[in-house]
Amino acid sequence: LNVIKGRVTVVLFVLEMEWLLSTGQDKNFTWHCSESGQQLGSYRTAAWVSGLQFDVETRHAFVGDQSGQVTILKLEQDSCSLVTTFKGHTGNVTALCWDPVQRVLFSGSLDHSIIMWDIGGRKGTAIELQGHNDKVQGLCYASHTRQLISCSSDGSIVIWNMDVTRQETPEWLDSDSCQKCEQPFFWNFKQMWDSKKIGLRQHHCRKCGQAVCGKCSSRRSTIPLMGFEFEVRVCDSCHESITDEDRAPTATFHDSKHNIVYMHYEPTTGNLLTSGSDKVIKLWDMTPVVS
């Protein structure tokens, strides 16, 4: 098959359909009959594709691209239709993982974050997971234990417990002054002139989303149920409301000791394969932590 002009970025074989899905830097997403090689259809994406998943039951293709957008396409034997698009990442979508049981899509990105999209519930819920210090390079899901495995260029392998009730992160609110002490931000010239005070820098509390100044958000805390496994900025009142139970981690962290560029998990054996930029391939027994 020679239909993609430029570098091929993702290839996916759908055994049940006898289809071969492929994408490349020419922004073309195509699918072929794997037996005859005949091209069945194609779709032009807005940016070159960097992630791809397929659901056999619904015939939905999940396409993640360089702009941070995820597109859902409904594939037929010789045509496709656009279902929807959504965007939550600020960088390339580098990895996609689909859970056909819970009907949840996970996306990883260059922006170091993972987003869990509620596709089956159709609620539009997006749960953000922050547990890496570099770009997310791979995602796998152990559906029998409801655990997400993520790998990153920072060398870490993170096991996320998804069998907990997670909370959606709030949208950041807009304000011309601190929503706690009412001091003006530096662009609020009128209030600065009226109060004869120098404007302050704006921050946001990760728990409530309010716009606050540095003095009113001087504390840090983990909020694992919101996906923040690392300490993040919270306002003083939210910090007081967070209990030790709220800070209980929902993920475990493991050092792979190499810069991971690719991963594959085999649930039947519990083995995880990682390859790194150091040209080393490692095989991990994940049964002690994925159980």
Image (cartoon, rainbow, N blue to C red):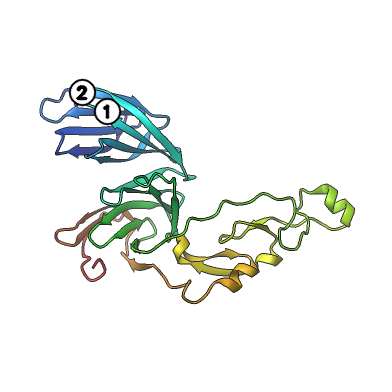
Q: Which residue is mark 2?
A: 39
Q: In this rendered view, identify the residue nearer to me: 218 or 80.
A: 80
Please tell me whether residue 35 is drawn above or below residue 63 in the rendered image.
above
- How many C-alpha atoms fall within 10 Å of the one at disc 2: few (<14), some, or many (≥20)? some
Please report whichever mark, 1 or 2, sits nearer to the chain's N-terminal start.
1
Query: Which residue occupies 30% across, 52% down?
Result: 102
Numbered circle sitting on residue 30: 1
Q: Secondary structure at mark 2?
A: strand
Numbered circle sitting on residue 82: none
Q: In this rendered view, identify the residue nearer to me: 177 or 265.
A: 177
Q: Is residue 62 left or right of residue 282?
A: right
Please tell me whether residue 243 is drawn above or below residue 43 in the rendered image.
below
Please tell me whether residue 47 is drawn above or below residue 253 in the rendered image.
above
Residue 250 percent across, percent down from the top left: 39, 67
Quadrant of the rendered image containing residue 69? top left
Residue 182 percent across, percent down from the top left: 77, 59
